[in-house]
Image: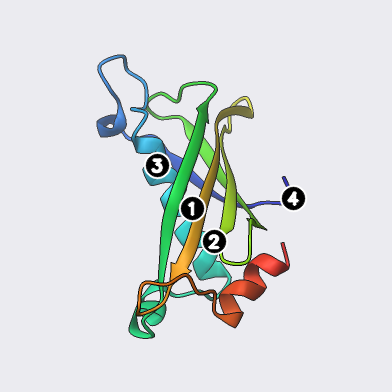
């Protein structure tokens, strides 16, 4: 993974399941939030894109669960990008517990952008983001 963009979060009690660990579905929220923060940091604004008729969408998510997070754990969510094809891009992501730097989740989230006709389309600013990866 290239030098990733990273945000830090803390596990909240309501994110836990009956076993006292973060529910598997919650990791999707962590990953999504980090992707949105990454895009904002790169000047990509979802609202502005939507007004232009462009929609960023996830078309595939692969998650490998390595270790569990528990209540109060502080963790980083890392984001690195890559071009998958002419119209697809990938976010390689990790959730890393800060206390011991243990990788809890590794993910590949593949997306594309759709134009107002619902066809794949990467605008120059979005394409440049992934071409520089």
The residue positioned 39% from the left and 85% from the top of the image is 52
C-alpha gap between disc 3 and disc 4 = 21 Å
C-alpha gap between disc 2 and disc 1 = 6 Å
Q: Earlier in the sequence, mark 4 or mark 2?
A: 4
Please tell me whether mark 1 sits on a helix, a strand or a loop: helix
Query: Would you call the spot at circle 3 few (<14 residues within 10 Å), some (14-19), or many (20 or more)?
Result: some
Disc 2, disc 1: CB below 8 Å?
Answer: yes
Task: Between residue 118 and residue 19, name the one nearer to us.
Answer: 118
Q: In this rendering, would 105 be left or right of 3? A: left
Residue 51 location in percent, x, y?
34, 84
Please tell me whether mark 2 sits on a helix, a strand or a loop: helix
C-alpha gap between disc 4 and disc 1 = 16 Å
Residue 1 location in percent, x, y?
72, 45
The residue positioned 55% from the left and 22% from the top of the image is 66
C-alpha gap between disc 2 and disc 3 = 15 Å
Residue bearing mark 4: 2
Task: Between residue 26 and residue 51, name the one nearer to us.
Answer: 51
Query: Residue 98 is drawn in which quadrant?
Result: top right
Query: Residue 69 is drawn in which quadrant?
Result: top left
Please tell me whether mark 3 sits on a helix, a strand or a loop: helix
Residue bearing mark 2: 38
Which circle, 2 or 3, is nearer the viewer? 3
Q: Earlier in the sequence, mark 4 or mark 1?
A: 4
The answer to whether residue 83 is above or below residue 75 is below
Residue bearing mark 1: 34
């Amino acid at each position: 993974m290239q030098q990733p963009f990273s945000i830090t979060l803390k596990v909240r009690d309501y994110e836990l399941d009956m076993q006292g660990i973060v529910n598997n579905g919650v990791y999707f929220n962590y990953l999504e939030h980090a992707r949105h923060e990454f895009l904002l940091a790169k000047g990509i604004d979802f609202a502005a894109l939507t007004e232009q008729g462009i929609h960023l969408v996830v078309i595939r998510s692969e998650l490998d669960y390595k270790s569990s997070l528990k209540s109060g754990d502080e963790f980083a969510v890392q984001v690195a990008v890559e071009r998958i094809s002419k119209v697809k891009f990938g976010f390689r992501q990790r959730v890393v517990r800060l206390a011991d730097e243990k990788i809890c989740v590794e993910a590949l989230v593949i997306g594309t952008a759709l134009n107002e006709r619902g066809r794949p389309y990467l605008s120059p600013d979005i394409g440049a983001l992934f071409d520089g990866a």
